[in-house]
Image (cartoon, helix red, strand yellow):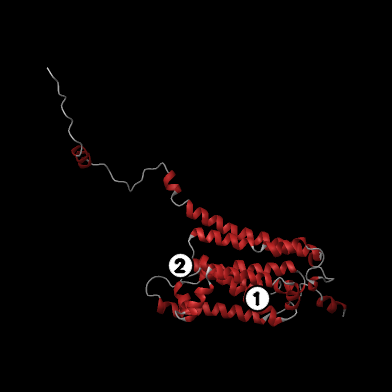
Amino acid sequence: MIAASADLVSPWRFQAHPEVWLLVAFVLGAYVYAVRVIGPVVVKTGPVITPKQRNAFIAAILLLWLGSDWPVHDLSEEYLYSMHMFQHMVLSYFMPPLMLLAIPKWMFDAVCGSGKARSAINWLAKPVVAGVAFNVVVMVTHIPALVNQSVTNGPLHYSLHILLVVTALLVWLPICGPDIQRQLQPGGKMIYLFLMSVVPTVPAAWLTFAEGAVYKHYDIAVRVWGLSVTTDQQIAGAIMKTGGAVFLWSIVVFLFFKRFSAGFAAEQSYQKDSSSDILTYQDVTDAFGRVAPAKEPNIKS
């Protein structure tokens, strides 16, 4: 009896989440079906997907599973708000861009079509619209009353996660979406990502410097890893601010060097350019032929 009671309060007890397994299986099955059945019909020349797209999908599906299943889901829902924040980072910062990188243009066209649905997605994926929508969702999902209710209400909890993932996908479409023509220019991407890293500082600072328990649901006797409720909140704020900012700024730095250092190595190289023209005898004679003959000096006797 004592052992059973201890198991009930153990943060590490296994809890099955068949809804998560079904979701992961559905996404995996849909992608494989599209690649093996639809792709060969649509793509007439070239590979259906590239190795990079395949690897990006594997990473994305693993992150989806990691962030939604045991033990991350259970720790984030019942014990640690810092784990809750880590879960949100996975579902909104790390997984969506990988999923978009995994989708080829033909698959994106097949899913979204070319009618009103595509027009709606294009409008929602505009940088200003997507950025505002995503950050509003981020701010709303940190309201204490909503957080305390969502962790005890399954439908509300999953609805908020779906809303977070959908708005995150819209945010990343101008950065790494399958439709290259809808992407921002490199300079626009850098500014866009920088601005996206600034907004989360508000709730992050609030969590870091708040006194007492902001979220009463996590103020419980069972403390995972011995973290107090205040320390847990501070770690959550650090994950939100530092983790998100480092990730986004890393992409900004990558885009900067990719954009402005293109051709720098070739320009600084001391090796002879093999593509340069070879000077020939005809070139020399033609050059001399274009020079006017020198006038003889007029010498007066």
Q: Do the residues labelled 1 and 2 touch (CB within 8 Å)?
A: no
Q: Where is residue 98 in the image (x, y as percent from the top left)?
A: 55, 68
Q: Is residue 144 or residue 112 the one in the foreground?
A: 144
Q: Tell me what residue is drawn at x 15 percent, y 26 percent.
A: 296
| Residue named by callout 1 | 161
Q: Is residue 58 visible?
A: no
- Mark 2, Cα crowd under 10 Å, few <14 / some 14-19 / many 20+, is few
At label 1, the amino acid type is: His
- Mark 1, Cα crowd under 10 Å, few <14 / some 14-19 / many 20+, is some
Real-space CA distance between mark 1 and mark 2, rounded to the nearest whole angstrom: 27 Å
Q: Which mark is residue 110?
A: none
Q: Tell me what residue is drawn at x 45 percent, y 47 percent.
A: 265
* Left/right of residue 181 with respect to residue 91 in the rendered view: left
Q: Is residue 74 or residue 179 the one in the foreground?
A: 179
| Residue named by callout 2 | 180
**Quadrant of the rendering where the C terminus is positioned:** top left
Q: Tell me what residue is drawn at x 45 percent, y 67 percent.
A: 180
